[in-house]
Amino acid sequence: MAANAASPFVDVLSFTREAPEPPLQPVPEIGRSQTASPFLSLYELDDGETDDPQSEALVATLAEFDDEEFDEALFEMLAEASALVDDRYSYEAADPERRQIDGARLLDAHFAPLIGETEAFLERLSGHLAQNGHLGPSAADIDGFVEEYVPAGMLSPSFENFFGKWAKKIGNVAKKAASLALPGGLILGKLKPLIKPLIRKVIKTAIGRLPPKYQPLAKMLAKRLPMLGEVNGRDDMEGLEPSDSADASSGISGIQQEFNQQIAYLLHAGDTVEEELGVARYGVGAGARADNAIPELDQARAQFVANLSQLTEAENLAPHVERFIPAILPALKLGIKIVGRQRVVKFLAGLLAKLIQKFVGPQNAPALSQAMVDVGLRLISLEATDQDESEAAFNALAATVEDSVRRVSALPEYVLDDDELFEAAALEAVEDAAATNLPPVLPEKVYRARPDLRPAGRIKGTWIVMPLRGCKRYKKFSRVRKATITPQMAEAVKSYGDTPLSEILQDQYELQPGADVEAQIHLYESLPGTLVSDISRLETATPGLGSVEPAAYSQMHPLTPEAAGLLLGEPGLGRSVAPQFLAENRTTDEAQRFYYLEIPGVRRVTHPGGAQRAAARRSGRTRLVFDFPQGEVRVLLYLSEVRAQAVAGQLRQGVSAATLRLFRRILEVRVRRALEGSSPGALKIIHGAVLPKPGKGPVLDRLPGVVRKWLAGRLTAWLVKGIAGSLKQHSQAFIEAAQKPADGVTLVLTLRNMPGLSEMREALKGKPLPLAALAGLGGAPDLHVTVRAGHA
């Protein structure tokens, strides 16, 4: 390939000095959103000819034990464990193999008290079940045992929180066993060998900093479930790239998902041998070594930066870049696409070497350091030394290499295989990476001719790799932006779970609706292996952060182009991400961007959350569950503490128009957005031909659009009319739930005998959907309302 010199970044003449002008800096361009994974087809099955009660029973069990709060507890422990390893062992200095061994030993000791308590709880509950005869205790008795159980030893807050969620899950296993007429004590005894593997998967993730990938449900269960085996017909998993399965079967959701598989195996296994094989497979997966890709990347990055600081202007940089790129690829989800394409690596290395050459050596290097200072390096750290400035400049060059490789890895195969197409795309990737990571280094006339090189030119800042000292974990934008957030802006900006920022400001800060909010906005970007808790922990100089606690990292919101455009007036500062990374903050995409609101004089409101501490309040959420085996649709309508108290106050005076208007607005918007897939994580399908997969869009999207529109309209009408008629009946229950110390109130709206549900059930198995018959369906379902205190 011939090097293309059409870019001002690699053109030597572009770097000639002009008379000093006010610095104008490039700001990152909108990132390319990731396309949906072809792996999705394994979970959203398109065919099926016969009913399969075994499939439906097992899938229903998997859905029943899927618990968002268990994921939250697992992530909290992961954040704490990762911080322990980071603080004890430097990624940059330690040998990755040695560090993995020492880190595992440290975390084994750290988790030992928790493992002991969870095993003791299993034994005590098993004994309690045995004392109640062959049939075992009632569900109420099991709930009472779980609520009254107190661990023998003192546990840390994160361990206490996990233990509470663990005890609840195991109590549900005991109740499920009783409902299936299974010996509960025997089932719990078989769960005991799974405790250490569960914790070791958390340890493995904390050490490797890359979520381990788990064997997909479809592949593991196809042999046991006739319908799934018929539908798959082939082993689609063979030959898939790691990136294809990373979104669904990795990270915290993957850890719980795989553990729930083992519970389902024990409750539905056909024989003892199958049970033992399932337990053995689970243990083998936990015993595998953690991935060293992130520690090795950290080490290679540090070495590359050290090499840059020692090079002269005349030295060829291409070999150094070529050695750095192979360390980057394993840490990228799509990096494997470049492995074996040496021509791609060599061309990219040559292109990047031309760019970097302008900023190394005694004569050239100080100019980049000064440019970093000019765009706000010292605003990030008032204690930055001359050495920090120099290292920040070289880290910016390393970040340019990493970003270029990431962008090239995302190119489609046909571009990578064609020399001319690849050459043009690689040049664009380098330009985008340079504009993102470097301060303004080109003459003003170049920026006037190529405004795309500074897509957010009004904001004078750049992305700086952080922390300045120690192992690099994230980037921070060098300028903290002041903004006035109007009510209209706050309503339009969406955070995780499609929650409007306006609700977060009201629910978590108790700010009055309708008022402007003056805030300082801090911007961040993840590096490979970053946990959102890494950013909150290391931001010690930022008020409200500097902690690994959930109350800190839960304040990080996704900086999408829409959010950046509304809050900052510069959509180019945002990054698009796939929907699964917008459902919750426990999974972070590569180069994902976040923002944190510092509101002077305002602190977040907490509630007694147990586990020896106060917890941040939740914002409202609405979730739909289409439970086809039970023949019902459930809507879980969680009202935040602020809204719950407001509704309770209104209900004390009787059901008012304001109360009805609140519920109508929530249901009309949230039901429609859940069904159309624009509200990540808001829809769950329980169906014998659909395996649960957290974070993905709804499987209903394969139904005709007219059917989804019909469904949204009818479902909303039934719910709104039904709740209007039920509020008076349930007013006292709601008021009593709001008076309890739990955070908020949950309404569970259950629709039974819903017209059209049986037709949809058949359509999801691949059978034709009679549109005319569906449109002509009359009648209304039965609505049952349950009121629960807290987040259910």
Image (cartoon, helix red, strand yellow):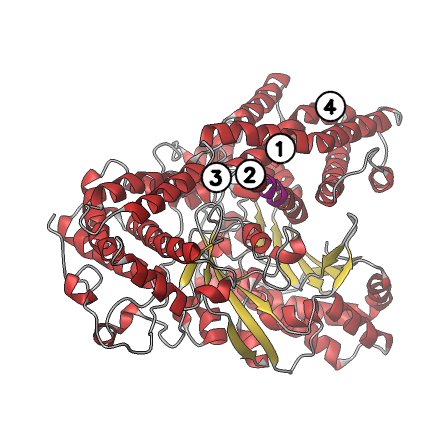
Q: Is residue 387 above or below residue 501?
A: above
Residue 348 percent coordinates (x, y):
22, 48
Q: Residues within 10 Å of mark 4 (few under 14, many from 20)?
A: some
Residue 524 percent coordinates (x, y):
48, 60
**Which marked residue is nearer to the observer: mark 3 or mark 1?**
3
Residue linked to disc 4: 189
- Whether tag 2 and tag 4 are in contact, CB under 8 A, the answer is no
Q: Is residue 66 above or below residue 683?
A: above
**Which marked residue is nearer to the observer: mark 2 or mark 4?**
2
Q: Residue at x 69, y 79 (%)?
A: 512
> What residue type is disc 4 on?
Gly
Whole-angstrom CA distance, mark 3 to mark 4, is 40 Å
Can residue 310 be seen from the camera position used here?
Answer: yes
In the image, residue 26 lies in the stretch drawn in magenta: no
Residue linked to disc 2: 206
> What residue type is disc 1 on?
Leu
Q: Range of the magenta residues?
A: 78-84
> What residue type is disc 3 on?
Tyr
- Whether tag 1 and tag 2 are in contact, CB under 8 A, the answer is yes
Q: Residue at x 25, y 73 (%)?
A: 447
Q: Residues within 10 Å of mark 1 (few under 14, many from 20)?
A: many
Choose the circle earlier in sequence order: 1 or 2.
Answer: 1
Residue 107: assigned label: 1
